[in-house]
Amino acid sequence: MISRVMSAELAEHAGERVTIAGWVHRRRQLKSVSFLVVRDRSGVAQVVTSAALPAEESAVRVTGTVTASPRAPGGAELIEPEIEVLAEPVQAPPFDLYRPVVSAALPTILDHAPVALRHPLLRAAPEISAAGVAGFRSTLDALGFTEIHTPKIVASATESGANVFGIDYFGRPAYLAQSPQFYKQAMVGVFERVYEVGPVFRAEPHDTARHLAQYTSLDAELGFVRDHRDVMAVLREVMAGMLDSVRHRAPGAVATLGLDLPDVPAEIPAVHFGEAQRMTGQDEPDLSPAQERWLSEWALREHGSEFLFVTGYPMAKRPFYPHPDPERPGSSNGFDLLFRGLELVTGGQRLHRHQDYLDALAARGESAEPYEGYLRAFAYGMPPHGGFAIGLERWTARLTGAANVRQVTLFPRDLHRLTP
């Protein structure tokens, strides 16, 4: 391993001569002494020197003696240093990275993402995102799920019509996958319980603060369920696991952003779509953003929960594969999970019998031929199953309070942005 001490560990090595490495975060040059603040992945460390100071954002390696200093970050600093400059910047960052607040506007941040994301405030959200993904994986691993990796180039645009990206695949038409939905259902017939973390692509012409053309989807599917409520129970565990992971894996990022992480109730409250319509006084085939906010406020007020399930969405509003509610004609065994005023997760129970798929497609006036490859899995006996998909960037935005999903996306792709 690299013989190096992280800045957060410096106080543990008082009196020792150690090596740190990182970037020059800030320089302060006084008459008789200078201070160099070095930033690494764990935080910052202070170096006391009389030598010339390298430019800010230079990559450096510093060897020095650790001494206690109440005024230094972490209560310790390096003295008598040997400073090696590993690389110098050829230009200054677009804004000062050492300042406690970010002075640049979002377009400037996105245009200069490789350097802008070095700012502690801006790198905190990706840290939280990474911790959430780790929690997603570890929770499902503990529940007997198998991680899978499915194709992102597909032969047919069958799931939701025209909002797909077409590509030339060796002279043949192909598409970027909108979802691993069909593949994860097929893999229930192999592993019973599967999940995937991967990119999905939506060519939807939405230029809003919550839509992206490419985002990361956290998908799960499980077999031998009784109905959608079993899926909801697993999703509750996943939400709790993701938040616990953020608490334990990214406490520094949580503190940097001053976040108040929510608690997931032992049982997330749920309302049926019809009841949600009655409560909000509207009669539309889907919930509007205003309805989602109202329902979230109601759940917090009445149940003390920042999470709310809305179940029983109309079959006409869903794709062809949701399982109908046997007790409510026209309703599905599907659900959305609202979090802090926004739809965060969509899921439900799926059809599992081959003939039911043929009947569902016929009822919609669609031919089964384009779905032949998908339907093949159901010709060999599939258990009742269901699953869900979480948009990672949307989850991170809700958790951090970001007003725009692009604020928590490393290199967003939308209607206007294809670089960097």
Image: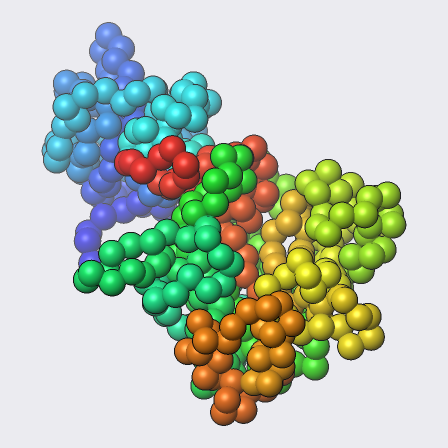
Quarter in which the N terminus is drawn: bottom left
> Which residue is found at the position 46% from the left and 53% from the top?
162
Which of 73 and 184 lies nearest the eye of the viewer? 184
Q: Residue at x 42, y 53 (%)?
A: 164
Q: Quadrant of residue 44?
A: top left
Residue 231 in sight in this render: no
Left or right: where does residue 179 sit relative to residue 12? right
Q: How many marks?
A: 0
Residue at the image point whose x is 18% and y is 21% from the top: 91
In this rendering, is residue 336 above or below 366? above
Question: Could you say where residue 357 lies in the image, as x and y percent from the top left?
Answer: 58, 78
Residue 35 at what x, y percent from top left? 28, 21
Q: Quadrant of residue 14?
A: top left
Left or right: 52 in relation to 325:
left
User: Of residues 233 and 321, which is closer to you in this image?
Assistant: 321
Q: Quadrant of the C terminus?
A: top left
Q: Position of residue 198 (x, y in %)?
A: 40, 60
Q: In the rendered image, is residue 52 in sight?
A: yes
Using residue 236 as the reference point, say whether residue 96 is left or right of it: left
Q: Residue at x 24, y 23 (%)?
A: 56
Q: Outermost residue, bottom direction?
A: 380
Q: Is residue 278 above or below residue 368?
A: above
Q: Is residue 13 left or right of residue 322?
A: left
Q: Nearer the viewer, residue 92 or 201?
A: 201
Colour basis: rainbow
Q: Position of residue 307 (x, y in %)?
A: 71, 52
